Amino acid sequence: MANAIGNNGGRLYSFGAQPVLIDCNFTVDSTNGNGYGNRTLKGQGVKAVYMYTTASLTGTVATTAAQITSIAGGTSSLMPGMEVQGTGIPAGTTITSILSSSAVSISATPTGNHTSESITYQAPGSPNPSAGYALIHLTSNYNRYLGGFSGFVSPSTGGTIAINSTSLTPGTPYVIASVGTGPDGSATIAPVADVNGSLASTYFTLFDAYGNTFVIWFYVTGVGGSAPTFLGPQVQVGQRGLQYVQQTIAENATPANITTALSSTINLLPSGVQGVDSFTTSGGGTSTLTATSTLAAPLAGIPEDGTTTISQSNTAQLPIVFTVTTASANANSVWTDGFGNLYTVTANLSSGTTLNTTGAQMPGAASGTLTYVSGTGSTTAIAYSAAVAGFATGFTFALVNTNTNLACWQGVGVKHGVTPAVGVPFIATSSGVSTGGGSSGTVVAAGVSGITSIEVIGNTNLTIAPIASGASANVGGWVLVQFLAATNSSTTTLVPTNPANNSVVGMSFYVDAKLSPSDNTARYP
């Protein structure tokens, strides 16, 4: 019965005594400062790939020292063993050590003095091949070269294109050039004015992108206020979690006054990361304040206004607002609902319909009558039609930027389950993502490598197992290949041609690590 993998149970048979398949892939990059003519080589069985390179530096040489000094751009890409060429530099000269970020020592003293000279160089061991050739150095010796396979990934072309606009063409392939970051989450806060202390003890909850919940409660000068600690215990200083934040405002503060005060407070809210605040703000002194995260991530949720319910176990004095028929009551006078609950008036009411009080519990009846207990002013009973816990500020809140960076990439076509990274290809499904905030990531259009085939040069069996000589073990076989392309659009003759930069080349080499007795005999002359 056929095996699920294949009729042979997933096995691959070979006449080789110890066959080995060596895989590698790399990105062609003739300008890369590493001097190899390529970058990001991957493949356990391959030590290096040497290709055509234009790597160069600008520096100064003099006859007084075997050095290159005043190197523009630094020395981070240089290493001992790199061969260098330039005016006044003897042939075969190599870098012997890195002296500083702007100087290296070399193996021979220059024969002339040259300032700001262009000096070319190659990776250690590179034979400096011409364009169109690659010399592959394997990590081990082998007994026989059996064959090889190759493949290309198309390079990119043109400049970078932002994905947070409308510049992509749906149905067209693109390659990620930079992953970027998602938008900084933000929220808007539109306050209402305080009326005779109406905002005292009210609060709203602000969520950041770091895992903090800030309960911002109002203390009105001359009226007072208290924190809604019934929401739970506050975390310790320096920890992330629930934090109570007092916001002091003047009695009868306008919305513009309140956004000015909130701007100063919110700008200082701690993220839990040392030296980093949770938000920056804009719009202070206007009718609407915008709080923007300092982290490139959405906020944990839309700001929430204060609750309108009170726990039955509460004993703290909390704001409770009664809707009444036309009535009068003086501040600090005390009234009862007839169910044992007492309410202290917080602001004078004269022929008004909204009575602001503090109390520990909601009245025993949804509608009813408040009777006078103590204090100055009117003692006439007050009929009320509704009562609500006055924790809500009445402010208006909205989220502005809600996208994550991943959501932005998925919105333009990157498949779900694929992590956005430089080099990831995808077919655009939209022209860009900006609603809800866009990513700073960019893409490039797919190009053409220009190569039609790859050929092995010479008899690789003669270079697959170098022999030791002197102190060198000479470990690692060699494979020389050429990349072929048409001479031009009108001449189809194939000539060695370097693949376009950013082409990704994949190669496999099929070798035998051990010879059987029959392998030593040719089948025919």
Image (cartoon, rainbow, N blue to C red):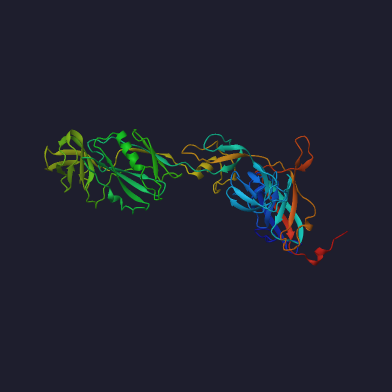
- Residue at the limit of the structure toward the right, as seen here: 525
Q: Residue 245's x, y, as percent?
A: 31, 46
Q: Residue 194's x, y, as percent?
A: 26, 36
**Residue 334 can be seen in this image:** yes
Quarter containing the C terminus? bottom right
Q: Is residue 185 above or below residue 286?
A: below
Q: Is residue 145 above or below residue 500?
A: below
Q: Residue 414's x, y, as percent?
A: 56, 44
**Residue 153 can be seen in this image:** no
Looking at the image, which residue is at 34% across and 46% down?
214
Looking at the image, which residue is at 30% across and 50% down?
231
Q: Classify residue 423 as left or right of residue 401.
A: right
Q: Classify residue 296 as left or right of residue 141.
A: left
Residue sitting nearer the eye, 95 or 499 = 95
Looking at the image, which residue is at 64% across and 49% down?
67
Q: Residue 488's x, y, as percent?
A: 75, 36
Q: Classify residue 304 as left or right of residue 334.
A: right
Residue sitting nearer the eye, 287 or 260 = 260
Q: Is residue 109 above or below residue 438?
A: below
- Residue at the limit of the structure toward the front, as seen here: 64
Number of numbered discs = 0
Q: Classify residue 205 as left or right of residue 14.
A: left
Quarter containing the N terminus? bottom right
The quarter holding residue 471 reads bottom right
